[in-house]
Amino acid sequence: MIEVLVADITTLQVDAIVNAANRSLLGGGGVDGAIHRVAGPELLKACRALHGCATGEARVTPAFRLPARWVIHTVGPVWHGGQQREAQLLENCYRNSLELALENNAETIAFPAISTGVYGYPKKQAVAIACGLMQEYAPRFKSIVACCFSEEDAVLYRQAIGGDI
Ligand code: AR6
């Protein structure tokens, strides 16, 4: 099942939440900042031990003070106009995160709209990629949540899942 929710991802009681991180994995703004604030300083300590992450890859840590069990940190591509493998790299983020969740026996997972904030990826295109991968993996999870930060974003997800884009 794919669920589209308008929520702060740090409040979700799922097995794994996905963080839109940067290659340092040492925190930042946006959803990354929110996750680190709620998880507490133990998360930064766990991230330091990972020594970074390449764009498109994913790493897992415990979720510490968050209601989730795991945080899966993935690094989305910065949008440079679309000719620098951005679509492939964004697809890799979703696929690698979902595979890592399965390896950790997660049955429920929530994603923010990776790369669509500070990294500037056009939302409609990013959501189409996200929904393609969520639909591919849906049979292997109890629930995959598209966690939107605005009702406008939720409309894009519902349209993409309905096959309108
Ligand atoms: N819950 C759910 N979604 C959120 C939340 C939240 N608490 N906060 C923001 N969003 P961004 P990026 C949405 O900028 O584009 C960081 O500094 C937001 O509305 O967080 O991948 C990292 O350290 C947007 O739709 O991530 C990197 O340096 C989406 O999450 C860089 O930003 C992603 O926006 C990564 O940029």
Image: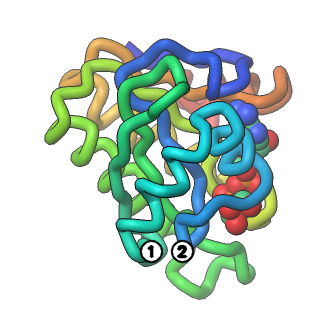
Task: Decide if residue 146 is on the left or right side of residue 46.
Answer: right
Q: Are marks 1 and 2 in contact (CB under 8 Å)?
A: yes
Identify the image quadrant of the N terminus. Answer: top left
Rate crowding at label 1 as few (under 14), some (14 to 19) or many (20 or more) other CA atoms within 10 Å: some
In the image, 151 versus 36, the foreground residue is 36
Residue found 65% across the figure and 78% down from its top: 82
> Residue 54: image x %, image y %?
43, 77
> Residue 105: image x %, image y %?
17, 28
Task: Decide if residue 156 is on the left or right side of residue 24.
Answer: right
Please give the residue where the numbered disc 2 appears in the rendered image.
23
Residue found 71% across the figure and 19% down from its top: 7
Q: Is residue 90 above or below residue 18?
A: below
3D distance between C-alphas at marks 1 and 2: 5 Å
User: Of the residues shown, which amino acid type is indicated by label 1?
Assistant: Gly
In the image, 51 versus 53, the foreground residue is 51
Please give the residue where the numbered disc 1 appears in the rendered image.
52
**Label 2 secondary element:** loop
The label on residue 13 is none
> Residue 53: image x %, image y %?
42, 72
Residue reaching furthest to the bottom? 84
Would residue 156 be seen by someone viewing this image from the given angle? no
Residue found 61% across the figure and 38% down from its top: 40
CB of residue at label 2: within 8 Å of ligand 1?
Answer: no
Q: Is residue 64 above or below residue 72?
A: above
